[in-house]
Each structure stands twice: as C-alpha cells, then as structure tokens.
Image (cartoon, grey):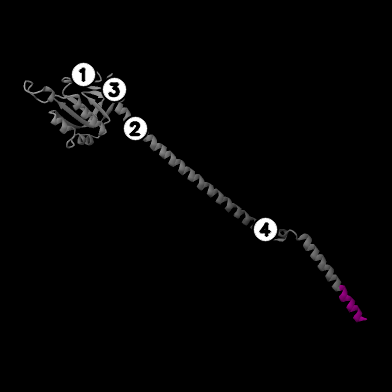
Amino acid sequence: MNNDQNKSRHILYAFVFLVAGFIFAFSYRTLGVDRDASLPEGFQKEEQYRGDLIEQKERNKELADEILAKQEEIREAEKSFSTMEEDHSILVSEAKDLRLLLGIVPAVGQGVRVTLSDADYNPTEQNPNDYIVHESHVLRVVNELKISGAQGISINGQRISENSYIKCTGPVIKIDGRTFPAPFVIEAIGESNVLAESLKLKGGVMDELEHDNIIVSLEQLKEVKMPALREET
C-alpha cells in the first residue's frame, strides 16, 4: 500500500513539474519577445549612448568633408581674385603709360636731356646744310628715346605725342605748328641710365649725329617735368 502511494506521489510531482515548466516556457515566450525589456536599465542606456556616439561620429565626418570642400572653394575664389587683381594692376599700369605717351597727362620723373646745336662753319666756303640741325636729326633722337622706353618727350618745352608733326624749315623746325630755332633741347622721362646708354651705343645715334657735324650734349637728370598737351593748348 505504501509503495502504491509513493508511486502515485512521484507521478503527481512529475505532472506538476511538467505543467510548471510549460507555464514558465509560455511566459518567457510571451513576455520575453522584447529582449531589451529584460536587460538592466543601465545596460540599455549604455547601448543607446554607444549608438548616439556612432551616429555623431558619422555626422562629424560629413561636416568635416563639407568644411574641406568649402575651404577648397575659398582657395579657388582667392586664386581667381588674385589673378583678376594682377590683371587689373597690369591694365592700370598700361593705361598710365599710354596716357603719358599720348601726352594727355602731366609727366614727372627721372630722365635725360639731349641738346642738338648747329656746328660752326664758314658760309662762304661750306654748305650750311651740312652743319645745321635738321628734322631727321631730331627724329633720330626722338625715335631712339621712344624705343628705349621713354614715357614722355618734349622739344624746347613743347610736349609731343604719337601724332606730333615735326618739319624742318631752314634753320628752324616746326612742331605741331609751332616754330622753334636751334639749339633743340630734347627731354625725355624714363630710366635715365637706359635712355642714356641707348643713345651712346657705339655706331648709334650720337655717333651718327657727330658724323653729321651736329654738336650733341647729353645729361642725365633726377627730375624732368612736362605739362600735358591740353595745358599747353
């Protein structure tokens, strides 16, 4: 009898454990679907912080890339602006030189003074034309000065331009309708050393003038002043 009771008790316990296991498994599957809900609160926050940090790092990288792109755009803009500024400076300089050459603005600066004088001669024995200054002599000096970079030229105080007309009439020359006698004083503004050396080249302008019996003197000046053509008018 006792054996039958023990056996029945074991069967009952086994049935109770089976039912309890089933209930526990059912409860885990029902309530444990959300895994994070079963995790400790501190661990959940750590996971959230870690995710936020990764997201922020990715955003920072995007911002860094945008900054680099903007910096490159700024460099390109600065480079373009610098080129435009240089071009503008060149144009301003060229315009200034052109105004000086045309004589429409006053000019001042270092330069040279070339004086051409008639040579002494005996009119009864020698041809006067072989000893006086002609327009060709004046033009040789003027053209050499222009080629050497003169920014302004005047003859006997008369400013000349690219369109000036120089004509010899006996012992005098006419410049744009005005008459000037010898000696002819030609002044030019520019690099005085360059202008002077160009005139003194061996076989150059000064040698040719002296060969034509023209008395030539050359001075280098620290300052030469010339009025604008319209001021003379």
The kind of secondary structure element at disc 1 is: strand
* Magenta part of the chain: 1-12
Q: CA distance from mark 4 to mark 2?
A: 75 Å
Give amino acid for label 1: Thr
Q: Does the CB distance between marks 4 and 3 fall below 8 Å?
A: no
Q: Position of residue 115 (x, y in %)?
A: 17, 27
Q: Position of residue 135 (x, y in %)?
A: 20, 24
Of 191 and 119, the residue lying toward us: 119
Q: Which residue is mark 1?
A: 179
Q: Which residue is mark 3?
A: 229
Q: Earlier in the sequence, mark 4 or mark 3?
A: 4
**Disc marking residue 44:** 4
The kind of secondary structure element at disc 2 is: helix
The kind of secondary structure element at disc 4 is: helix
Query: Relative to 225, is 11 on the left or the right?
Result: right
The kind of secondary structure element at disc 3 is: helix
**Disc marking residue 160:** none
Give amino acid for label 4: Gln
Q: Is residue 171 above or below residue 86?
A: above
Within 10 Å of disc 2 (Cα), the crowding (few <14, some 14-19, many 20+) is few
| Count of numbered marks | 4
Q: Earlier in the sequence, mark 1 or mark 3?
A: 1
Q: Position of residue 1 (x, y in %)?
A: 93, 81
Q: Earlier in the sequence, mark 2 or mark 3?
A: 2
Give amino acid for label 3: Leu
Q: Earlier in the sequence, mark 4 or mark 1?
A: 4
Q: Is residue 190 visible?
A: no
Q: Which residue is mark 2?
A: 94
Q: CA distance from mark 4 to mark 3?
A: 91 Å
Please identify the quarter of the rendering in which residue 51 is found: bottom right
Q: CA distance from mark 1 to mark 2?
A: 32 Å
Q: Is residue 38 visible?
A: yes
